[in-house]
Image (cartoon, rainbow, N blue to C red):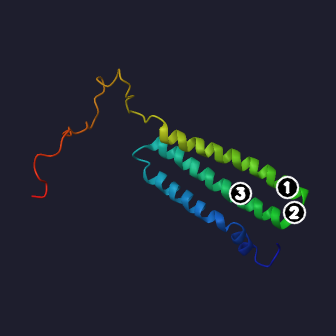
Amino acid sequence: MSSNFPAFEFLMVNAARIPLFIVYIVGFVLALTTWRRHPRASLLSLIAFVLFFLAYLLAAGLNWYVLSMHSGMAAGLWLTAGNFVFTVIIVVAWGLILFALFARRPGQPDWSADERERYPRQYPERDVPSGPPSQDIRK
């Protein structure tokens, strides 16, 4: 796979990864824009998206390097070792995403049955009538 256009080769080999790169960049930007509302979750998400981006960028580079420089058993060993490392990085990133999503936010009460009376909700739900409305709303 050697030619006079290594950048073009790199893009052709890794064209399927471009949507993932876009998703990771969007996630990175969203984590930055929501930083003030929930800084810990945004920080964990930001680190995770950076890890995702780096893992896929390194995987793309390794695949291109191995396919252009090695063949046979050496290529298989390089790809196996690289995929193991990238899988570990991706698992850590997913762990950060899950923790950011489901961890309790600071200052947020635990809504167990015993504590509901002690910590009333800041925005209680509206009372919704159980039956149909008594008036026609089209008037």
Labels 1 and 2: the sequence-earlier one:
2
Query: Is 99 displayed left or right of 84 in the figure?
Result: left
Q: Which mark is residue 58?
A: 3
Query: Is 99 displayed left or right of 83 in the figure?
Result: left
**Residue 101, position as x, y percentages in the image:** 48, 42
The residue tagged 2 is 70
Using the rendered view, name the quadrant where residue 62 is placed: bottom right
**Residue 20, position as x, y percentages in the image:** 59, 60
**Residue 96, position as x, y percentages in the image:** 57, 42
Labels 3 and 1: the sequence-earlier one:
3
Quarter of the picture holding the C terminus: bottom left
Please, what is the three-letter code of the amino acid marked with disc 3? Leu
Q: Which mark is residue 76?
A: 1
Mark pair 3, 1: CA separation: 17 Å
**Residue 80, position as x, y percentages in the image:** 80, 51
Element marked by disc 3: helix
